[in-house]
Amino acid sequence: MRPHRGSRSLAQKNRIDQLKHRRNAIARMIALGATDKEISEHLNVSTFTVRADINKLMEELNAKNRAHVAYLVGLRQGRKWQMKRHKEIRDESR
C-alpha cells in the first residue's frame, strides 16, 4: 500500500526544516552584507547552493534583488525589536 500522497517521512520533514533554517540564515547574512562566498564558507555549502537558495528566497519573498531581501529581513527583525521594546516600556510604566 502506498502512503498518502501528502504525507512525508520524518527524514523528509527534517530535510525541509534544515532547508528553511539555512534560508533564514542566508537571509540574515544577506542583511548583514555578506557575499555569496562568505555565506558558503560560513554554512559549509557550495556557492552554487547559496545562489540557488537566494533565488528561492527572492521568489518566496517576492523580492527583486538582494537589497530587497535585506530590507524585508530588517523590517521583520525591526518589528520584533519594536514589539519587545513596547512591552518593556509598558511594563516599566506600571
Image (cartoon, rainbow, N blue to C red):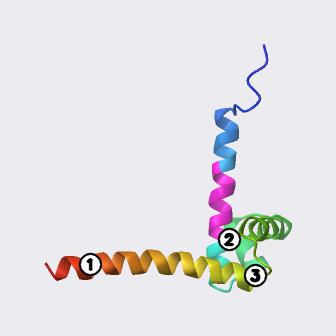
The residue pinned by badge 3 equals: 66
Three-letter residue code for mark 2: Ile
Q: Position of residue 69 (x, y in %)?
A: 70, 78
Span highlighted in magenta in the image: 17-25
Q: At 74% across and 64% down in the image, what residue appears?
A: 60
Instruction: Write down the quadrant of residue 76 in the picture.
Output: bottom right
Instruction: Write down the quadrant of residue 65 in the picture.
Output: bottom right
Q: Position of residue 10 (x, y in %)?
A: 64, 34
Q: Position of residue 47 (x, y in %)?
A: 82, 70
Where's the C terminus, which quadrant?
A: bottom left
Crowding around mark 3 (Cα neighbors within 10 Å: few <14, some 14 to 19, many 20+) is some
Q: Of helix, strand and loop, which mostly describes the magenta segment?
A: helix
Q: At 25% across and 82% down in the image, what residue appears?
A: 89
Magenta span includes 93: no
Q: Position of residue 27 (x, y in %)?
A: 66, 73
- Front label number (1 vs 2): 1
Magenta span includes 24: yes
The residue pinned by badge 1 equals: 88
Determine whether the residue tagged by mark 1 lies in a helix, strand or loop. Answer: helix
Where's the N terminus, which quadrant?
A: top right
Going from N to C along the chain, the mark reached first, 3 or 2, is: 2
The residue pinned by badge 2 equals: 26
How far is the residue under mark 1 from the one under mark 3? 33 Å
Determine whether the residue tagged by mark 2 lies in a helix, strand or loop. Answer: helix
Going from N to C along the chain, the mark reached first, 1 or 3, is: 3
How far is the residue under mark 3 from the one under mark 2? 11 Å
Three-letter residue code for mark 1: Glu
Of 48 and 84, which appears nearest the observer?
A: 84
- Front label number (3 vs 2): 3
